[in-house]
Amino acid sequence: MSNKEGSGGFRKRKHDNFPHNQRREGKDVNSSSPVMLAFKSFQQELDARHDKYERLVKLSRDITVESKRTIFLLHRITSAPDMEEILTESEIKLDAVRQKILQVAQELSGEDMHQFHRAITTGLQEYVEAVTFQHFIKTRSLVSMDEINKQLIFTTEDNGKENNTPPSDSQDKQLGTWRLKITPVDYLLGVADLTGELMRVCINSVGNGDIDTPFEVSQFLRQVYDGFSFIGNTGPYEVSKKLYTLKQSLAKVENACYALKVRGSEIPKHMLADVFSVKTEMIDQEDGIS
């Protein structure tokens, strides 16, 4: 016990080596010293960077919400006769999303994008998903990353009333444009999420009596899956993680096409959706067991 008390009291005796008045002298620091001035500038820089990060997180959240609303709108095409009207409305919504992306580009002007990438990656992935979904409905093809980036080059005329961060005079004179480039990882993750939306389009179209769409979606998803298979485990962790979900979506679509091809003539059109929903649940249960 005496040894423990001695070891426990060592800290007290160690502090007692420094008189109380000497320890307090360290608080009286000259605020105009070069060291204090340097640390004050560091504090201001870190505070400004933190505030910028929080603004980007908020913008990314707004981009995510508006992109999801665009995707929900595009799903109405399978049951709505006015396809062109919905596509026009979706384009208006995507233009509003690009105005948010313009604000992100202005926030990142003169900054290293990769330092703030984590704050905006979720919104950019959702935007890629919405744009690729709309492009597939129009052309039955996949829009390239370069074509998406071309839409994210903004001039000073695109600086609408929504933008709360007007450009400075130096930016206006030197640059005149703002741009935000979608990274390859964000593009791949957005395309991987697109496959889930296409799977829903396939099942919904069957329920509406559309027999051609499932086969078009199946062929497209097979090409996307083959492309992701080339990446394999060599790509980023997030991409390889999405590969499993992509494989599930492809299996559900191929199962629907198989039922249409083999048993399509036996099952009435109004019952096809019920048959596919039951088989989809069976696939989900098998995946959960495995």
Image (tube, helix red, strand yellow):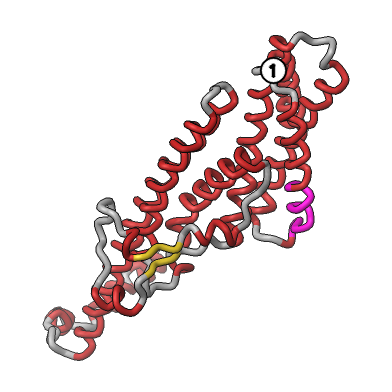
Q: Is residue 11 magenta?
A: no
Q: Position of residue 164 (x, y in %)?
A: 24, 56
Magenta residue span: 224-233
Name the residue carrying label 1: 209
Secondary structure beneath label 1? loop
Q: Residue 263 vs residue 123: left or right? A: right
Q: Amino acid at mark 1?
A: Gly
249 in relation to 131, above or below: above
Residue 41 in the figure: left or right of residue 279: left
Q: Residue furthest right?
A: 262
Residue drawn 69% across and 13% down?
A: 274
Does the magenta segment cover residue 232?
A: yes
Image location (x, y in percent) of residue 20: 15, 79
Magenta residues, dominant SS class: helix
Give the quarter of the image for residue 209: top right
Residue 119 visible at all = yes
Residue 229 percent coordinates (x, y): 78, 52
Look at the image and tell me in which quarter the N terminus lies.
Answer: bottom left
Question: Residue visible at 23% across and 88% down?
Answer: 35
Q: Residue at x 27, y 72 (%)?
A: 12
Quadrant of the drawing holding the C terminus:
top right
Q: Vertically, is 35 above or below 73?
A: below
Q: To which quarter of the image does residue 27 belong? A: bottom left
Q: Nearer the viewer, residue 280 or 69?
A: 69
